[in-house]
Amino acid sequence: MEKVAFITGGTRGIGKQIAITLAKCRYDIAINYRNENEELENTKKEIEANNVKCLAVKGDVSNFEDCEKNVEEIISKYGKIDVLVNNAGITRDTLLMRMKKEDFEDVINTNLVGTFNVTKNVISYMLKAHYGRIINISSVVGIAGNAGQTNYSASKAGIIGFTKSLAKEVASRNILVNVVAPGFIETSMTNVLKDEIKEEIAKSIPLKRMGTTQDVANVVKFLASEDSSYITGQVINVDGGMLM
Ligand code: NAD
């Protein structure tokens, strides 16, 4: 029986690359999405081109009931979830001085509460199966902080604390919980920055380039695999040496 991986926010960017990379390793895939669009259809086709199944479930990770329904739908189709990748995330960058209450709440509710909502609904199935891999996508700014990102940094730091606590709770059931903390990766999230700013940032990175979505997906693939079976509660930075 193929292993099943559920990737939140899997229609584009890092999540899409993770889904395709795991599909290449013969996982059946489930992704969630908020709106039907061309992006979703193309991603589904790219996943299925690897001769694996792809189920797309509609839901907002910040909504607990949506997550409950998403997980039920995946379980009724596949019977299990072996790997969960909590990837869905947003930014609402601005200095605290100017930050609206909604900017703070939206980011915490999507990134941190979303990670809780999905994991809470998946964990009982993993506990019963005595098997699971949970990989939470944080960020190096959750470790180092970043001006203009108090909301985002707090959400990503929260994900690290959540991960370590859960790793301790479920280790005895052979469920491993780890964090991948990307640095500066080329996606629509970073495309909003001006080219000059991107070049400046790239210069400050020891490996002198922005990361690719594949750089992140490769580490998720490792953490999902049996090669990482003695690793739990860890934060692995994928940042070209930005933070060391
Ligand atoms: P992206 O904006 O391209 O993709 C984010 C995905 O999450 C999209 O598919 C979006 O629809 C989905 N999403 C957002 N809110 C959602 C919600 N409430 N419910 C369901 N889905 C939702 O961004 P990306 O760069 O691919 O980011 C993926 C993850 O990586 C995020 O958690 C982000 O914080 C993290 N990250 C990105 C970078 C970077 O440089 N791009 C760096 C560090 C961490």
Image: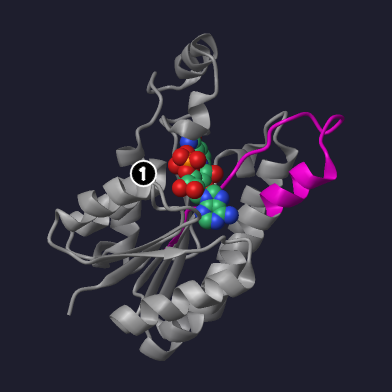
For the N terminus, give its image quadrant: bottom left
- Depth check, front residue: 40 or 136: 40
* Label 1 beta carbon within 8 A of ligand 1: yes
Which residue is at 61% across, 67% downward? 116
Which residue is at 40% across, 47% downward? 37
Indicate yes or no whether the magenta region holds residue 26: no
The residue that label 1 is drawn on is: 39
Which residue is at 69% across, 32% downward? 93
Colour setup of the view: one colour
Indicate yes or no whether the magenta region holds residue 91: yes
Rendering quarter of residue 225 = bottom left
Residue 146, given in percent of the width and then of the height, sits at 67, 32
Residue 182, given in percent of the width and then of the height, sits at 47, 40
Q: Give the amino acid at mark 1.
A: Glu
Q: Which residues are magenta?
A: 85-108
Q: Is residue 146 left or right of residue 42?
A: right
Residue 218, given in percent of the width and then of the height, sits at 29, 47
Q: Residue furthest right?
A: 97
Which residue is at 42% across, 82% downward? 126
Q: Does the rendering let one see residue 169?
A: yes
135 vs 197: above or below: below
Q: Does the rendering let one see residue 183?
A: no
Q: Is residue 182 left or right of residue 226?
A: right
- Depth check, front residue: 37 or 14: 37
Q: Residue furthest bottom?
A: 128
Helix, strand or loop under label 1:
helix
Q: Residue furthest top?
A: 196
- Depth check, front residue: 65 or 83: 65
Q: Is residue 100 left or right of residue 39?
A: right
